[in-house]
Amino acid sequence: MFKASKYKDTSAKILFFVCAGLSVVAVFGIIGFILYASVPAFRQIGVFNFLFGTVWAPDLYNNGLASADRVFGILPMIVNSLLVTLGAIAIGGTIGVFTAIFLVFWCPDKLRIRYAGQNKFLQKVVSCINKINLRTIFDQIIKLLAGIPSLVYGFFAIEIIVPMLAAINPEGVGQGLLACFLILAIMILPTITSLTKNALEAVPEQYYEGALAMGNTKAQAVFRVVFPAARSGIISALILGIGRAVGEAMAVIWVCGNRAVFPDGLFSYIRTLTTNIVMEMGYAPLDLHRPALIATGFVLLIIVLIINLSMNLVPKEFKGKRGNKVLSGEKTEIIYRKKGLVPEILKYVSMTLATLVAVILALIVGFILVRGIGGLSWHFLFGRSTNADPTLVPAFAVTGYVILFTLIIALPLGIGAAIYLVEYAKPGSKVVKVLRTFIDTLSGVPSIVFGLFGMIFFGDILGLGYSVLTGSFTMVLVVLPTIIRSTEEALIAVPVSLREASYGLGASKVRTIFKVVLPSAFPGIATAAVLSIGRIIGESAALIFTVGSILTFGGSPLDQGSTLAVLLYTLSVEGLEKDLSYATAAVLLILAFLLNMIVYFIERRVKKRNK
Amino acid sequence: MFHKQKAENTENQTSTLDIFDFSGENAITIKDVDLFYGEFQALKKINMQMPKYKITAMIGPSGCGKSTLIKTLNRMNDLVEGCRVVGEIRIGGLDIYDKRVDLSALRKNVGMVFQKPNPFPMSVYDNITYGPRTFGIKKKSTLDEIVERSLKQAAMWDELKDRLNKSALGLSGGQQQRLCIARALAVGPQILLMDEPTSALDPISTGKIEDLCEELKNDVTIVMVTHNMQQAARISDKTAFFLLGEMIEMGDTEQVFSAPKHPETERYITGRFG
């Protein structure tokens, strides 16, 4: 009567394994198909001429004025990409790490403002301010910074950073290398801050206590013991930041100045590998120019892969220093002096930089909301859209479609993969290591490369062209790692005792997973879904060449259109109407904020429940 | 976790007290000390003296306040939010809860060894020189000397002299704990607080640490919290028995174990409760 089905368990295991293995297929697929589409370029231009040529002038070739081997050189762009990344990580890395230190060690829970006056209103205001939990707010700020679409950053850069730089530059130019440094530094801040924060919080508290018991001040304990103990985590955070900066396209597209030459100063116009692709793909002839752009993407992909794989080289555990040899000697009188100043200074550095981050965010959000909300009207939000009078309605529809199709495909795949990794695979086994490496690799692939892959594979080879489906399939690959990671964390958090209770009643593994484990992990999975929605709404580089960028939408999944973020790109790049660009940016920002709130409330509920 | 501490008053003071004078007979004098965690009173009117160059053991059932008391002696309790100390604790002639006392100087003089060994994730050498470096010693030859002296004091020089550059995390639990003792000794403390230093260790390592304590009391005063009554009986000179936040009895170890004055003490050491 009660028959356990061994067969069902085995087939389920295979199914979950396939889900997990998809990441491996995806990574190889992306590398393979982009290489395949680049081959004509490598063949006609020559790998050496392509990589080390210093002239990029495809138009000369397209018009028959020059031979292929002389005008398709990407060396300046490789140099620019690396240079921009170096600057961004120097600025953003420093600020991010110090901000994280401030958040973990010195951020007060609550402000304590004293107000002795009689004014009833001011008294109320002060007591309200004192009630705010500063730490939570700061955490949320960092998360919001991470959720802001890169195009919005780009928009902020061209409207604020560039004019500011132009004011301090005697030649009156704001665009160029320095502007790229700054905006990329801001962009990678949240990644670096939140990962550094995790690394610092993972340091056992006993190290900190031990240092204090030795007579350390708090600053000394933090900078001399806890910080070095978190070293490997912080290095990983910086490497991830580097990967993001190299692959970022949209944030720098309007501020780099777009000249494929070697820079000769901080205000020199430059062009990165990413911007090269975005700027020229739209009109590139298919014979050589387009493959050359795809080949640019291939070079970018290889650079990013090398950077991200270098993470595995970071030593996880402390290794002893060499060269300290102790000799027996005479006893001398030891004089203990007062403590050093450096940690105390670093403490104030971290406080200052954290404040700076808060100011930057306030600037971005404030600026875009103030300028954008003015441009919002009932008509722009919900009115009929035409090419002459574009509204947001088609973009809402396209974005909604892409979210729907992406999640329908990505959620089951991601959850399945997570189930395999947590419930079936042996922890620490080779299979898990390989799968995890590929999932991490997939999450490090730049958006623009996903876009190229989607265009080549789903668009050209499967024949879907520019369409909602092409975009959705592409986005599945983009959000898959996030979903796997969040679901995994949620599954791991489900107590083993629950599983044991289910097994104890004779339930099969599959039944236990579906009836006991997954329901308990539901909030984590919901968080993953919301995060994915945020990523889809904010994504532009992966969608421009898959969903398309036209202003209207036919209504079928096979039609092209543009999502909200792509619309912002189109509106700005074509200079249609500045107010509409601002309004679109404001809508994107508000959506990012709302999604952040949802995640916050889900997480808070989970925390409460677990208490 | 970290942010809750308010132990930063050393940094904002004008005149600081940092000269400790241990010429007196007692290293520690505790007078009428009450301690509160918020509303809860964890220590009630504690009065005791801990004689110099002796081992004082504090025993009692869980939650009796002995760990709380040992943590007030180097003010590690400052880390606990809502912790308030009333009364007077004199160490080396200073009231250590005086606002002007330099916390760094206090903790330099009053070293601590924790229940769980907590070497830093650094080499053996760097662990031991960590404290001296904190206090501004940079000269290589001096540091070398300190390392050798501290390790010899902790009776592990021969074990470790060829492994000074290896990670301290690679040592066994017992070795790690003795390294922590050596690390504490490296800044030349007068007092060593040990909060159940052997509870996480095997019997052989425990024995080594007990032997070490007997050695060390020639140079430092030791205060030890222990759950293990045999341990207290074996190595301590004075024993104090705690129950529900009160000190019930304190005296010479032999007397406390052979002829306790209070019935509660007797019941505890004969194993009838706790």
Image (spheres, coloured by chain):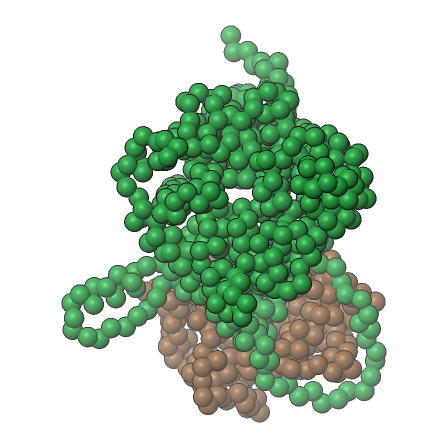
Answer above or below: position of A360 versus A557.
below
Image point 54% across, 58% down: which residue? A175
Relative depth, front residue between B232 and A608: A608
Judge by depth and name the residue closer to the eye, A137 or A407.
A407
Instruction: Answer above or below: position of A329 versus A264.
Output: below
What percent of the width, then of the height, locates residue A173?
Answer: 53, 62
In the image, taking residue A4 as reference, residue A132 lies left or right, namely left
Q: Residue at x 55, y 67 (%)?
A: A171
Q: Quadrant of the C terminus of chain A?
A: top left
Residue A207, picture quadrant: bottom right
**Chain identifier, brown in the render:** B
- Quadrant hosting residue A430: top right
Q: Return the x and y of residue A364 as percentages of the image width and height.
A: 42, 56
| Rendering coords of residue A164 (x, y %) | 47, 64
Taking A306 as reference, is A348 above or below it?
A: below
In depth, the one of A552 and B152 nearer the eye is: A552
Chain A: give its colour.
green
